[in-house]
Image (cartoon, helix red, strand yellow):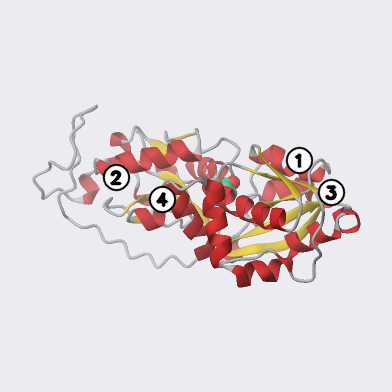
Amino acid sequence: MFNWNWKRFGMVAGLSLTLVAAGCGSSDEEGSETNGDSDGGESASEVNYGEEMGYEITGIEAGAGVVGAAESAVEEYENLNGWEVSTSSSGAMATALGEAIENEEPIVVTGWTPHWKFAKYDLKYLEDPKEVFGGEEQIKTMVREGLEEEKPNAYKILDQFSWEAADMESIMLEISNGTDVAEAAQNWIEENQDKVGSWTEGTEKVDGTEVELVYVNWDSEIASTNVIAEVMKEQGFDVTITPLDNGPMWESVAAGEVTGMVAAWLPGTHGDLYEQHKDNLVDLGANLEGAKIGLVVPEYMEVDSIEDLEAAE
Ligand code: PBE
């Protein structure tokens, strides 16, 4: 199961819990659609967000690390007694978040950075004093064993692939605003020739060498996988990108069935999958630093910490 041994990555939670006594639009009536019609004077401690949300954390795909971490949080935080983590898809989570914000309703989602939602909405991570969600993460590249000998140019490009959170976010934002995925990747490549040049540096063009990259349909990985795929196509590779669930993504690389992936969130988020497969794959190191996972809420919610949420009973 989950082995959240991340104490050394833990962030110092400067816990300045300010409970603002402002009207926050909750309703006592169960099932009420009321929003934002409170006449003020209600303190945060009187607001039972949990009840309004049906004690539900809006999750994403069942196999995602952040969903596993949220389930661990429900077990570890006494105040999350009776809460549940719902699973669906990253897209459904984003839709639910957008709708809640439109109606100024409370919502808690399993969130991560980099993600376009932070550019589009005013959001905050809930403090996690028990450090269930760990600290700073890296996104790493993993390839199958034997790739370096068999396809040295593919290996080298994947090894040299590295960018910043802001790069990834700009593509994600464009896609979320309706631009076609491949086009958004192309646009970014055109505007970032220096970076792309450093990834292909020292490699030779090929003529149709096959490469298969696996990923999960998380917005962040849609962006990274499409960018590296487009870059490799321009170098002459015949690239297939295949969306899978998280477990099968790791398994297919470890089994040597596919070339690799650029979607390994470590040390925490995919820590258990890494432990399971590390002897059968090649770790090419970080392609992005400063990633993070956690529980995310709209700014207007008067909670700062996971511990501010109320138990169901
Ligand atoms: N994520 C995005 C993934 C890793 C990348 C945070 C949704 C996960 O939780 O497994």
The residue tagged 3 is: 280
* Distance of label 3 from label 1 (alpha carbons): 9 Å
The residue tagged 4 is: 296
Across and down, in percent, residue 41 comes to 11, 50
Q: Residues within 10 Å of mark 4 (few under 14, many from 20)?
A: many
Label 3 residue SS:
helix
- Front residue of 69/255: it is 255
The residue tagged 2 is: 101
Question: 251 left or right of 116?
Answer: right
Question: 109 left or right of 211?
Answer: left
Lower position in the chain sequence, tag 4 or tag 2:
2
**Identity, as a three-letter code, of the amino acid under mark 1:** Glu
- Front residue of 298/304: it is 298
Label 2 residue SS:
helix
* Distance of label 1 from label 2 (alpha carbons): 37 Å
Lower position in the chain sequence, tag 3 or tag 4:
3
Question: 292 left or right of 54?
Answer: right
**Identity, as a three-letter code, of the amino acid under mark 2:** Ile
At horizontal 35% and vertical 46% (from top left) the residue drawn is 309
Q: Residues within 10 Å of mark 3 (few under 14, many from 20)?
A: some
Contact, CB < 8 Å: mark 3 with mark 4? no
Instruction: Tell me if the residue at label 2 has its CB under 8 Å from ligand 1.
Output: no
Label 1 residue SS:
helix
The residue tagged 1 is: 251
Instruction: Tell me if the residue at label 1 has its CB under 8 Å from ligand 1.
Output: no
At horizontal 54% and vertical 41% (from top left) the residue drawn is 67
* Distance of label 3 from label 4 (alpha carbons): 34 Å
Across and down, in percent, residue 65 comes to 59, 45
**Identity, as a three-letter code, of the amino acid under mark 3:** Asn
